[in-house]
Image (spheres, rainbow, N blue to C red):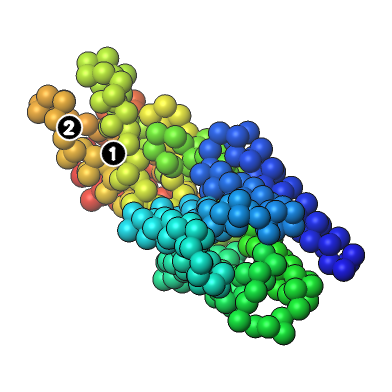
Amino acid sequence: MAIAVDLHLMILGLIFGLGLVSLLVHFSLGRGQALGWLASGLLCVAVELLVLRYGARSQLGAASLAMLVPAIYFCSSQAVRHATGLGPTSRRVTIGMIALAALSLLLLATSLPPTLQYVPLQLASIFVFLDTTLALARKHQRTPLEHGLLVLGFLVLAGVIVRVPLFPAMLGQPTPWAPLDAVLFERVFIQSMGVLNAGLAILLVARIVTTVIADYRHSSERDGLTELLNRRAFDALVDTPATARGAIVMCDIDRFKAINDSYGHHVGDEVIRSFAGMLSLHCDHAGRVGGEEFALLLLDSSHEEAVAQAEAVRRAFNRLSHPAIEPGTRLSASFGVAAFEAGSRIRDAMRSADRALYSAKRNGRNRVAVAEEAAPLPEAVLSAAA
């Protein structure tokens, strides 16, 4: 029995520690509802284990469990849902869980057998957690951690279902299973459920942490206004030797300061977002490298293809209208294109494209210019850009 008690307390310590860590991380980040729900659920589990250990035989302890057990699975469900992007539990399911838990509290005041008194609170736990587990099972493109959460979710559900007729034994009360040994039940079943719940919590923490890391990495690499790569991330792409041929396109919105001065910065921001959206349609590696300056990295593309891409964006942007901008005012952008070969420095091509961009600016704007070392611009494109 001493071994069972020690293991029980170890599980209690592990769950309590996970709850505190989750709570501290939640408050330190100032974000992450999943961590808040997980911390609440783990702290409820810790209280439940203490009640089972020291107060299960009292009426107050039984009433506490009637509220704690559904609360644990509700909090766990919300943590899983927020961590995996499923959204909160529906109001219908929440109301059903609360009604079943309240029914258990009412039945505790009757003379019904203990097995029947505790059935509603366990059905409440199954109801809310099954709803979340099935929602996760229906999710497309689950990550490996989400697959693990799904497996553990079904294992926990199986344990809760098996526990339904045996729950009074946790409180030292009679069950229909007379030969059941209370010590064996505690050692095997309760602690197995503790291990499963702890495993579920650890996977949840891992899923939440990977999501937070991915969010911070995304925000560190993306421009806040346009969601394109920021200057630092784009520089990281061009500071390596090219593994294949390609091209760099540098682009700049013409007379952008005049747009800001005439129509306000909010209109300027909308113009920038519109231009960025056009660029993102033409290239996976598009970056905002200055206030109104952008760059495209085109891999496995010929020089002619890069010129055609730049020309397509130029035409589309020149046709763009904004309700706040006077109809006679046309938006335009200038472009510089430079090609590179496999093994060459992409950074050198970027400098050449930048020089070509400023050549386009000097020669009247709203045009595509090609770096001197590149092949001549096709006549059809030259006439279109004029």
Q: For the residue carrying disc 1, how many other residues have a C-alpha within 10 Å: few (<14), some (14-19), or many (20+)?
A: some
Asked whether residue 242 is in view, the answer is no
Drawn side of residue 266 relative to residue 162, left or right: left
Q: Are marks 2 and 1 in contact (CB under 8 Å)?
A: yes
Q: Which mark is residue 214?
A: none
In the depicted view, which residue is nearer to us: 22 or 48?
Answer: 48
Counting residues from the start of the chain, the first of labels 2 and 1 encountered is 1
The local secondary structure at tag 2 comes to loop
Q: State the residue position of label 1.
A: 274
Q: State the residue position of label 2.
A: 322
In the depicted view, which residue is nearer to us: 298 or 353?
Answer: 298
Drawn side of residue 207 relative to residue 97, left or right: right
Q: For the residue carrying disc 2, how many other residues have a C-alpha within 10 Å: few (<14), some (14-19), or many (20+)?
A: some
The local secondary structure at tag 1 comes to helix
Q: Residue furthest front?
A: 111
Drawn side of residue 178 relative to residue 139, left or right: right
Q: Residue furthest left?
A: 327
* Residue name at image x 61 percent, y 51 percent: 60
Can you say which quadrant of the picture contains the N terminus? Answer: bottom right
Is 349 rendered above or below residue 49?
above
- Amino acid type of the residue that numbered disc 1 sits on in the rendered structure: Ser
* Residue name at image x 56 percent, y 43 percent: 36
Can you say which quadrant of the picture contains the C terminus? Answer: top left
Drawn side of residue 173 relative to residue 257, left or right: right
* Residue name at image x 12 percent, y 24 percent: 326
Q: CA distance from mark 2 to mark 1?
A: 10 Å
